[in-house]
Amino acid sequence: AKFLRYVPPATVIAWLLFGVLCGGESVYDIRGTIRVPKEAKPSEMRVILNSGRFTGIPQADGRFIIHGVPPGTYFLEVQSIRFQFPPVRVDVSARDSGKVKAMSADPMRPRERIQYPLNIRPKASAEYFEKRKPFNPLSLLANPMVLMMGAMMLIMVLTRFVDPKELKKAREEMARQDSSQVESS
């Protein structure tokens, strides 16, 4: 403990960094290929582990390498504007000198093994906008305004089929009710 009192803090930090860099865990590479249609450019995509902790940029032919990955379990995603890719769970083994095992992390295909080096294909093209429904003239009938206009026209048409004597009698009855209401007020 007395020895550490006389050592400058910068030296201690340098020793710690040297120990981490030289004597730390081994790091490995994760390799694979992205298979997309010919008109797409894989170099515009990104392959990321654990939400960006490690990143790889595919070459023009789709091959990628993610360098400096320590042993552990990772979640690999391909970020693309034009395509949706299935997520992949990647296990880098510390015991088997960096042997990489991969399996699908897609809930629709659980525990599906994927060969290494990875060969990733898009599951769908990305849809950003909802397609507009075509015009349907029958949809106008569901409009409340159109329904009210239809009911009024139906009433107008039905009044033509009423007997004129009955119509005259109904008008006289309504006039009497109106006059009785006016006298009572």
Image (cartoon, rainbow, N blue to C red):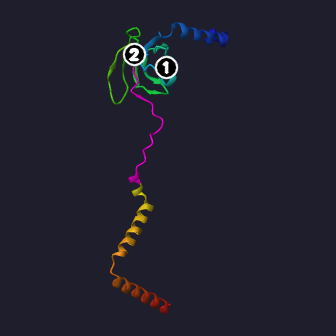
* Nearer to us: label 1 or label 2: 1
Kindly indicate the quadrant of the structure image that contains residue 91: top left
Above-or-below relation of 174 to 13? below
Q: Is residue 133 above or below residue 28?
A: below
Residue of label 2: 118
Q: Give the mark nearer the N terminus: 1 vs 2.
A: 1
Residue 28 location in percent, x, y? 46, 10
| Whole-number angstrom distance, CA of label 1 to CA of label 2 | 18 Å
Q: Residue at x 51, y 23 (%)?
A: 52
- Report x, y in % for residue 142: 40, 57
Residue 75 sits in quarter: top left
Relative to 131, residue 96 above or below: above
Q: Residues within 10 Å of mark 1 (few under 14, many from 20)?
A: some
**Residue identifier under label 1:** 41
At 36% from the left edge and 75% from the top edge, which residue is drawn? Answer: 160
| Left or right side of 72 for 11 | right
Q: Which mark is residue 157?
A: none
Q: Where are the magenta residues, as a range?
A: 120-139
Inspect the magenta stretch and tell me whether residue 128 lies in it.
yes
- Where disc 2 sits, the SS reads strand
Assess disc 2: are there few (<14), some (14-19) or many (≥20) residues with their C-alpha within 10 Å of its C-alpha. many
Q: In the orientation shown, which residue stands out farthest toward the bottom?
A: 183
Between residue 99 and residue 135, name the one nearer to us. 135
Place of residue 184 in the rendered image (x, y in percent of width and height, measured from the top left): 48, 92
Q: Position of residue 175 (x, y in %)?
A: 44, 87
Amino acid type of the residue tagged 2 in the rendering? Leu
Q: As shown in the figure, which amino acid type bears the numbered disc 1?
A: Lys
Main secondary structure along the magenta-highlighted residues = loop
